[in-house]
Image (tube, rainbow, N blue to C red):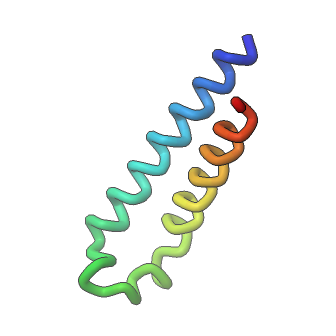
Amino acid sequence: MAFFVRSFLLLGAVVWLLVSLKQLVGLGIFENPGLVRDNLTLLAQALIAVVVIKTSVRAKS
């Protein structure tokens, strides 16, 4: 059962990370990096997703 929970958490975090980063790229953060300051919630979501992925990978090993 723990395997399924961990797998679901990892999959959800990966999808969450991809969506957050896609939105940031769509806003044009590469052309204007100052937009990151205006969209801190998207940046926070991406960072939280990375932490969840890191935690689940570390717990797996």
**Residue at image x 26%, y 65%?**
26
Relative to residue 13, is residue 43 depicted above or below? Answer: below
Between residue 50 and residue 36, name the one nearer to us: 50
User: Measuring 59% from the left and 24% from the top, which residue is drawn there?
Assistant: 7
Exactly how many numbered labels are in the figure?
0
Q: Position of residue 49 (x, y in %)?
A: 58, 51
Height in image: 20 above or below 9?
below
Question: Is the residue 61 above or below the residue 50 in the image?
Answer: above
The residue sitting at 37% across, 85% down in the picture is 33
Depicted 51 relative to depicted 39: above or below: above
As drawn, the residue found furthest toward the top would be 1
Looking at the image, which residue sits at the far front?
61
* Image coords of residue 5 (percent x, y): 68, 21
Q: Is residue 53 left or right of residue 2?
A: left
> In the rendered view of the protein, which quadrant contains the C terminus?
top right
Position of the N terminus, as image quadrant, is top right
